Image: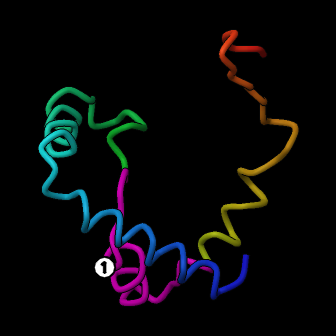
C-alpha cells in the first residue's frame, strides 16, 4: 500500500469521525464499550481514529502509519486465514 493511499484512507476515516462523533448512537456505543468490556479484552483496544491519532501522534513518536501497515500486513493478512460469506435474499451461504 502506497503512502498516498494511506493518506487518503486516513482523511476518509477522519472525515467519518468528524461527521459522526456527535451522533447519539455512536456515543452510546462508546459508553457501553467503556463500561462493559473488560480492559484486557481485544475489544477494549483502539477502535476508531482521527487524523490526530492516525497521523500526528504517530509521527510525534517517530513512526508513520505506512511503516506500521508494512510491518502488520505480512504477519496478519493471509488468504488462508480468510473466509467468504455471501448474503442474498435467500439467506447466508458459507
Horizontally, residue 1 falls left or right of residue 78, namely: left
Q: Quadrant of residue 16?
A: bottom left
Q: Position of residue 89 (x, y in %)?
A: 66, 16
* Mark 1 burial class by Cα count in 10 Å: few <14, some 14-19, many 20+: few
Foreground residue among 84 and 75: 84
Q: Quadrant of residue 71?
A: bottom right
Task: Give the residue drawn at x 16%, y 50%.
Answer: 23
Q: What residue range appears in magenta?
A: 46-66
Horizontally, residue 82 falls left or right of residue 67, namely: right
Which residue is denoted by mark 1 in the rendering?
Answer: 52
Q: Reply yes or no: does residue 61 show up in magenta.
A: yes
Foreground residue among 68 and 87: 87
Q: Quadrant of residue 65?
A: bottom right
Task: Give the residue drawn at x 78%, y 30%.
Answer: 84
Q: What quarter of the picture does the N terminus occupy?
A: bottom right
Task: Give the residue drawn at x 15%, y 45%.
Answer: 27
Residue at the extreme right = 80
Circle 1 SS class? helix
Q: What quarter of the picture does the C terminus occupy?
A: top right
Q: Position of residue 82 (x, y in %)?
A: 78, 35
Q: Is residue 10 above or below residue 61?
A: above
Q: Reply yes or no: does residue 77 show up in magenta.
A: no
Residue at the extreme front = 89
Task: Give the residue drawn at x 34%, y 36%.
Answer: 40
Horizontally, residue 25 falls left or right of residue 38, namely: left
Amino acid at each position: 500500500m502506497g503512502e498516498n493511499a494511506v493518506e487518503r484512507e486516513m482523511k476518509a476515516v477522519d472525515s467519518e469521525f468528524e461527521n459522526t462523533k456527535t451522533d447519539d448512537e455512536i456515543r452510546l456505543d462508546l459508553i457501553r464499550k467503556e463500561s462493559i468490556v473488560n480492559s484486557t479484552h481485544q475489544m477494549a483496544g483502539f477502535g476508531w481514529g482521527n487524523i490526530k491519532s492516525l497521523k500526528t501522534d504517530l509521527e510525534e513518536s517517530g513512526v508513520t502509519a505506512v511503516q506500521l501497515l508494512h510491518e502488520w500486513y505480512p504477519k496478519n493478512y493471509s488468504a488462508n486465514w480468510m473466509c467468504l460469506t455471501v448474503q442474498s435474499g435467500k439467506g447466508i451461504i458459507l
